[in-house]
Image (tube, rainbow, N blue to C red):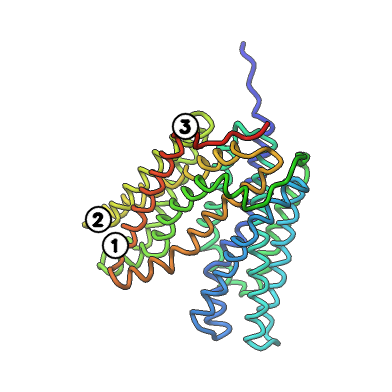
């Protein structure tokens, strides 16, 4: 009788890390829409103030990715992730003060901005630390699988956190929501504490911009991929409403369904077939979805475009991420991952305002043309990386 194969302990550890990342990222996801409502309705400030309070956390994340990566390389992924979770909790406490009625509205808003800045730092440190730790546990050969799990944790938090945050805001008020945002990362920190650490690697440190120079091609590819998701998230519903189509709220649902299904069933593909071919196929599918959204004659075709976009976007980050970790030595892995993630952060942050101007001038469909063209350029960039001499192997 054949022996029953036991689950891989390293994989179980990384799944536990993913759950902890999911819990901590709920503090980001739950506050996205709730912060805007609090600023506009409770503090009596305008939509511009609400948008700034949301966006400043992402700005903080972008600006601290490199520092967070260097920290993970220096102190190890476990300690880095734990520090990030503590920063999450501290950010929740500071944002809790923004609901204190004894303070003037503008003072509460300034406290809120400080908490949001700290939240962005916590997101940067926790995620980069988790990726560095997880790759150390599972090995570089399964880095694509690690990246897939990370994405499932983050996008799962987005899917659950939006409606959950608004529900908590409605039932418990802003203070109750911020208490939940303080406790969740602490729960995550307790959950990961028994998982063994991976000692940081020793070696010569390189300047951050030199590392960016080594990984900019996969970074640019994942950034170009992010344009399609950001355009869909910002303008899908408005495009439907402007045409009087039904199902305006289902765009992210179809996108998310495609995204998660691919991660569940094909998350191993970059490790098995290599990141470049998987990314090439993925960007082709995303481009097709965006072009279908651009030309859609009706709501059903547009929903099919959203589904294709999710199917295509799903594996670009893990595919290109697996290429990044091959191009740097182990002691620079965290810095490289931090810089790589910043490309996607930048795409998410910049796409909305830029294509919003185009939507005003050319209509909502034009933003999906931009998404399709961006994915096409990303595909060409990935294909160019397959030429001899374009990839630099990591040092031993």
Instruction: Estimate the spatial distance between the alpha carbons at disc 3 and disc 1, rounded to whole Å.
Output: 38 Å
Residue 169 vs residue 102: left or right? left
Label 2 close to label 1 by CB (< 8 Å): yes
Select label 2 or label 3 by which is in front: 3
Residue that mark 2 sits on: 296
Q: Which one is earlier in the sequence, the residue at label 2 or at label 3?
A: 2
Q: Name the residue at the front extreme.
A: 389
Place of residue 384 in the rendered image (x, y in percent of width and height, measured from the top left): 42, 39
- Quadrant location, the N terminus: top right
Residue 88 vs residue 158: left or right? right
Q: Is residue 272 above or below residue 13?
A: above
Query: What element does badge 1 sit on?
Result: helix
The quadrant where residue 253 appears: bottom left
Query: What element does badge 3 sit on?
Result: loop
Select label 3 or label 1 by which is in front: 3
Residue that mark 1 sits on: 365
Label 1: few (<14), some or many (≥20) within 10 Å?
many
Label 3: few (<14), some or many (≥20) within 10 Å?
few
Q: Nearer the viewer, residue 43 or 323?
A: 323
Query: Residue at 61% across / 13% down in the picture?
Result: 2
Place of residue 73 in the rendered image (x, y in percent of width and height, measured from the top left): 72, 46
Label 2: few (<14), some or many (≥20) within 10 Å?
some
Residue that mark 3 sits on: 388
Query: What element does badge 2 sit on?
Result: loop
Instruction: Estimate the spatial distance between the alpha carbons at disc 2 and disc 1, rounded to whole Å.
Output: 9 Å
The quadrant where residue 324 appears: top right
Instruction: Estimate the spatial distance between the alpha carbons at disc 2 and disc 3, rounded to whole Å.
Output: 39 Å
Q: Name the residue at the top extreme.
A: 1
Q: Which one is earlier in the sequence, the residue at label 3 or at label 1?
A: 1
């Amino acid at each position: 009788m054949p022996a029953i194969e036991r689950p891989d302990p390293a994989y179980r550890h990384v799944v536990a890390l993913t759950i902890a990342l999911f819990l901590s990222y709920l503090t980001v996801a739950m506050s996205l829409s709730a912060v805007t409502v609090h600023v506009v309705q409770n503090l009596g400030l305008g939509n511009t103030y609400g948008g700034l309070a949301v966006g400043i956390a992402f700005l903080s994340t972008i600006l601290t990715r490199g520092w967070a990566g260097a920290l993970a390389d220096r102190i190890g992924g476990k300690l880095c992730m734990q520090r990030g979770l503590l920063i999450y909790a501290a950010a929740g406490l500071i944002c809790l003060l923004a609901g204190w009625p004894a303070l003037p509205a503008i003072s509460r808003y300034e406290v809120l901005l400080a908490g949001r800045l700290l939240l962005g730092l916590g997101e940067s440190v926790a995620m980069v630390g988790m990726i560095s730790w997880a790759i150390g546990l599972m090995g570089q050969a399964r880095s694509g699988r690690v990246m897939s799990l990370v994405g499932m944790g983050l996008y799962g938090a987005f899917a659950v956190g939006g409606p959950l945050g608004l529900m908590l805001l409605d039932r418990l008020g802003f203070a109750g929501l911020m208490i939940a945002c303080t406790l969740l990362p602490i729960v995550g920190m307790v959950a990961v504490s028994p998982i063994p650490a991976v000692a940081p690697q020793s070696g010569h440190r390189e300047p951050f911009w030199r590392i960016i120079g080594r990984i900019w091609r996969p970074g640019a590819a994942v950034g170009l991929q992010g344009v399609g998701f950001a355009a869909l998230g910002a303008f899908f519903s408005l495009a439907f409403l402007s045409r009087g189509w039904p199902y305006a709220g289902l765009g992210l649902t179809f996108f998310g369904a495609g995204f998660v299904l691919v991660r569940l069933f094909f998350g191993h593909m970059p490790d098995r077939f290599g990141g470049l071919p998987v990314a090439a196929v993925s960007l082709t599918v995303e481009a097709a979805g965006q072009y279908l959204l651009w030309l859609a004659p009706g709501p059903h075709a547009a929903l099919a475009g959203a589904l294709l976009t999710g199917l295509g976007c799903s594996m670009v980050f893990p595919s290109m991420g697996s290429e990044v970790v091959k191009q740097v030595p182990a002691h620079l892995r965290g810095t490289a991952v931090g810089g790589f993630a910043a490309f996607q952060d930048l795409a998410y942050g910049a796409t909305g305002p830029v294509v919003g101007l185009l939507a005003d001038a050319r209509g909502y469909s034009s933003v999906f043309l931009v998404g399709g063209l961006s994915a096409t350029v990303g595909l060409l960039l990935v294909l160019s990386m397959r030429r001899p001499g374009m990839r630099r192997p990591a040092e031993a």
